[in-house]
Image: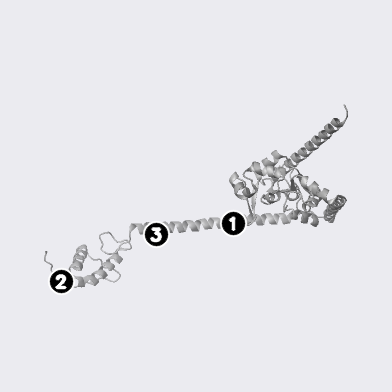
Amino acid sequence: MPRLLPLPCVPHLLRSRPAVPPGVIPLPSPHTLFLSFSLVFCFPSCRGVQAARVTFAAKAMGKNPPKWLPGERVKETILLQRKSVEQLRADRVLRRDKLQERRDRHKAKLDAKRKRKLTTKKFISAQTILKHAQRKEGQGRIFRKIGEKVRGKRQRMAPDEYKKSLDESRVVLIVRARGRQIPPEVSAALRRLGLMKLYAARLLCLNPRTDPLVKQLGPFCIMGHPEPAQLEELLRTRGSLWNEETQTKRLISGNLMLEQALGQYNILCIEDLCDALVNKTEHVQAVLQHIAPFDFHPPRQLFMERHRSVHQKLEMVNKDSFAAYLAQQLKGAAKREKVAAANKRKAAKASSLPA
C-alpha cells in the first residue's frame, strides 16, 4: 500500500498567497487542482474545502468547464433534449403567428367584401317588394285550391275504395324544388315531409296523412314513381341509412350494413331493398324510416353552379343538376307507363270484340 503524506508535508498549499489586484479573478494552477483532488480522497475532512475550490474554479472557467475538471457535468443527452424542446417551442410560436396572420388576412378580406357589398348594394324598390308579396300570395292560393280539390275528391270516394287506391299506389320519390321564398303553409307542409332545404329528397309510401300533402306540393316539388332500375341505381350511388338514436346517416357502402340495419325485415342486400320498395312488402313503412333523406345539391365549386346568382342558388333548381336530370327521367318513365297502359287497354278491347 502506498504511503500517504500527511497534510503538513504539503507546505505550498498552506503557504500564504500573494495579493491579487482588485477586479482580477485568481485561477488555480493545474498541479494545485491535481494535489487538491488527491487530498480529497486521502483526507475526507478536506472535502468541503475542496468542493468550494472546485466550484470556484468552475465559475472562473465559465458555463462549460472542460472534461478534466472534477465536479458535476450536464450530460449531452440532456443538452440535446433541451435544444429540441426549445426548437419545438420556437416552431410552435412561429406556427401560431402564421395562423394568426392567416386569420387576420381572411378577416380583412371578409371586411373588405362586406364594405364593398354595402357600397354597391342595389336599391330594392317598393314595386319589387310588392311583386314578391303578390307572388307568395298567389302560391298560397294555388296550394289551398289544390288542397280543396284533394279533400273533395277524397270525400266523394268510398273509404274502402280510397284505402285500396293507396295500397295499390307505388313508392313515390319527391324532391324539393323551391327555396325559402314560399308561403308559410307550403313551408310547413315541406317540413312535415322532412324536406328541410332545397334539393332534399325522400322516398315515401302514400298513406292518408301523406297523400294530400304530396298532391298539394306538386307545383313546388319534383315527384314521380322511379322504375326498378332507376331506384336501384339511386340507392347504390346516393343511398344512406338513418340512425334514429344518434340522428346521423351513413352512406350505404356494402351489404353488411343493410344486413345489420334491416336484417329483421329479411333485407340482406341492395336487390332485396329494391324488391321490398317496388313490391311494397308488409314492412315497407319501417324500411323507409331507415332510409335517410337524399341530398341532390350540386357541387358548389362547379362552373354550372358558380355562375348563377345568389337568388337562383337559394330558390331554384339548376337546370344542369342531377335533380333536373332525375325529373326528366321520372317524366319519361311516367310517359312510358301511360303508353303501356293505353296499349294494354287497346289490346283488351280488341280481344273482347267478336272475330
Above or below — where is 277 with respect to 185?
A: above
Query: What's the mark number on residue 188?
Result: none
In this rendered view, identify the residue nearer to me: 60 or 95: 95
Compare marks 1 and 2 and give the one earlier in the sequence: 2
Above or below — where is 25 with respect to 217?
A: below
In this rendered view, identify the residue nearer to me: 107 or 176: 176
* Disc 1: which residue: 103
Above or below — where is 225 with respect to 132?
A: above
Query: What's the mark number on residue 7?
Result: 2
In this rendered view, identify the residue nearer to me: 9 or 236: 236
Q: Quadrant of the N terminus?
A: bottom left
**Alpha carbon distance from label 1 to label 2:** 74 Å
In the figure, residue 56 lies in which quadrant? bottom left
Query: What's the mark number on residue 82?
Result: 3
In the figure, residue 275 lies in which quadrant? top right
**Alpha carbon distance from label 3 to label 2:** 44 Å
Label 3, residues with CA under 10 Å away: few <14, some 14-19, many ≥20: few
> What's the residue type where badge 3 is placed?
Arg
Between label 3 and label 2, give the one nearer the viewer: 3
**Residue found 27% across the figure and 66% down from its top:** 57
**Alpha carbon distance from label 3 to label 1:** 32 Å
Q: Quadrant of the C terminus?
A: top right
Compare marks 3 and 2 and give the one earlier in the sequence: 2
